[in-house]
Image: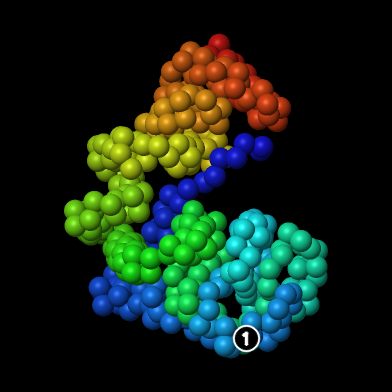
Amino acid sequence: MFRLHAALVLPALSLLVLGLNGQDAETKKEVAKKTATSLIVGSAAPPLTLAKTVKGAEPKAEDRSKTYVVEFWATWCPPCRTSIPHLTELQKKHPKIPFIGVTDEDIKDVEPFVADMGTKMDYIVVLDKNKETNKDWMQAAGEEGIPAAFVVVEGKIAFIGHPMSPEFESTLKQVSIGKFDMAAAIRKGAMQVRLKQTQMEAITLIRSGNADAAIKVLDTAISADADSETSLGALKFQILVFAKKEPEAIAYATKMTETFLKNDGEAMNRFAWNFIDPARQKMPPALHVKLASIMAQGADKASDGKNPNFIDTLALAQFLSGKKAEAIKTQERAISLAGSSPKLAEELKKRLEDFKKADKD
């Protein structure tokens, strides 16, 4: 399908819980051990233990006291392939900050890939030696997925996260203009560690079937720091849905659209589509339809009614709610805004035909 509806993590969480339900819950001590990190924002940058430099200038040991970016990637990783051109553009914007792409793959896989990328991958590319660099950076920081980027400023870790995140680009900009605040970054990094520990504790509890305790952990953290709801709210919402706490889930969905997701139409649309995606199930549970309707309305409002993808989601939610006539009008509105994208318009028209056919039955 042409339409770019990205799935959110609800099914993944559900599968995780179903797959592990019945196991003994990990203790808080075990959770703390699992989320313990020795490399955090403010730490001294570890060494780069490298086997070979595939592209660009070889990083020197004495450069550890300088400012640079270390990014972990792999040829088989689709998100990495997406981030590579972005990293190249950022390298061009910040020529005084060397970018170093690290992979632990075999050279026979890496060299052809880098050659094929050409100028799309225009920064230093190196091979990890015996995964030592991965151990000293990724494992030490508790980072489990790639791509992952580290910004080093004068020998200290200044940022840990996804290379496509706005914060990564913002950090580079602040460093380049000499306005980077390491103390503020350390405070923010410590908060992110706490959030990660809270998330892990809640997930551990839901894995053992204790949804109420998981929600309590999240609510306690949110009460202590209201800003944390932006990070923890989505997990709370998913647990409410998984535990089939219908009134609470509906109330919280409404709250999300009116508060911390109010201006994030993409996030609300992903939630909504995830609940009613026809590729997953033709007739989703009534609760999922209700939640999709709330989220889709929020997404449509956030985009001032101008995003055909969001409107399409809303139309499908209306149709599944039994509001067939309303769904037809909404879908027609989506089609009127999809003129610049023939493939999208074609898909929306097909769904409209399905709506009209069902309305006659």
Which quarter of the figure has residue 76? Answer: bottom right
Q: Residues within 10 Å of mark 1 (few under 14, many from 20)?
A: few
Question: Which residue, as the protein is rendered here, is positioned at the far top?
Answer: 360
- Quadrant position of the C terminus in the picture: top right
Residue closer to the observer: 219 or 153: 153
Residue closer to the observer: 255 or 157: 157
Number of callouts? 1
Residue at 80%, 68% in the rendered image: 115
Residue closer to the observer: 234 or 60: 60
Note whether 345 is above or below 124 in the view shown: above
Residue at 43%, 49% in the rendered image: 10
x, y percentage for residue 49? Answer: 59, 87
> Is 113 on the left or on the right of 210, as rendered?
right
**Type of amino acid under label 1:** Lys
Query: Label 1, on which residue?
Result: 60
> Is 108 on the left or on the right of 173, as rendered?
right
Question: Which residue, as the protein is rendered here, is positioned at the far front?
Answer: 178
- Quadrant position of the N terminus in the picture: top right
Res 265 seen here: yes
Note whether 305 is above or below 12 in the view shown: above
Note whether 126 is above or below 216 in the view shown: below
x, y percentage for residue 64? Answer: 53, 83
Which quarter of the figure has residue 356? Answer: top right
x, y percentage for residue 36? Answer: 35, 77
